[in-house]
Image: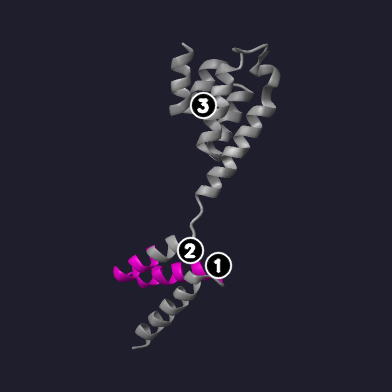
Amino acid sequence: MDVIRILLAIILPPLGVFLQAGIGLHFWLNILLTLLGYIPGIVHAIWIIARDRVIGMKTLESRGWKLCLALSLCLFVLGIAGCSQDAEQLFEVAEFEEKQSNLNHARQLYERIIEIDPNGYFATKARERLAELDKKSTE
């Protein structure tokens, strides 16, 4: 039964917690963790399911919530860091938008690049492209 709960916890973390602990504090905490980042929700759900299992002489329950919270926070921070758009990616999208004649969106992306990294290589290129777009719009 634990294997099924763990599989469900990977697919939909709150469901795994619900099957193990019902609707209570852990269920609502898991929903919050899942909304903040899918992986922290999975870690919490698996911890809830496996917390009564013995690991050596200690149980997960005795090491408890601190370990789960620390892992969830680390994974959440890593998830946020991985979701950022860097200047190079934005520049590529802006060039694509420009080629598709979506000049307003290209202009917004070039301005965002300058905002993110004003002294960077892609900010310089973005300024050049903005100047070209301004020339085209005045013609």
Q: Residues within 10 Å of mark 1 (few under 14, many from 20)?
A: some
In the shown orientation, is residue 38 left or right of residue 101? Answer: right
Residue bounds of the magenta highlight: 93-118
Mark carried by residue 87: 2
x and y, in percent, of residue 65 in the image: 67, 25
| Residue at 55 percent of width and 68 percent of height | 115
x and y, in percent, of residue 90 in the image: 44, 63
x and y, in percent, of residue 105 in the image: 40, 68
Report the quarter where the C terminus lies. bottom left
| Residue at 55 percent of width and 67 percent of height | 117
Q: Which residue is mark 1?
A: 117
| The quarter of the displayed image where residue 51 is located | top right
x and y, in percent, of residue 79 in the image: 53, 43
| Residue at 58 percent of width and 25 percent of height | 27
Mark carried by residue 14: 3
Amino acid type, mark 3: Pro
The furthest residue to the left: 100
Q: Up-down: is 3 above or below 122?
A: above
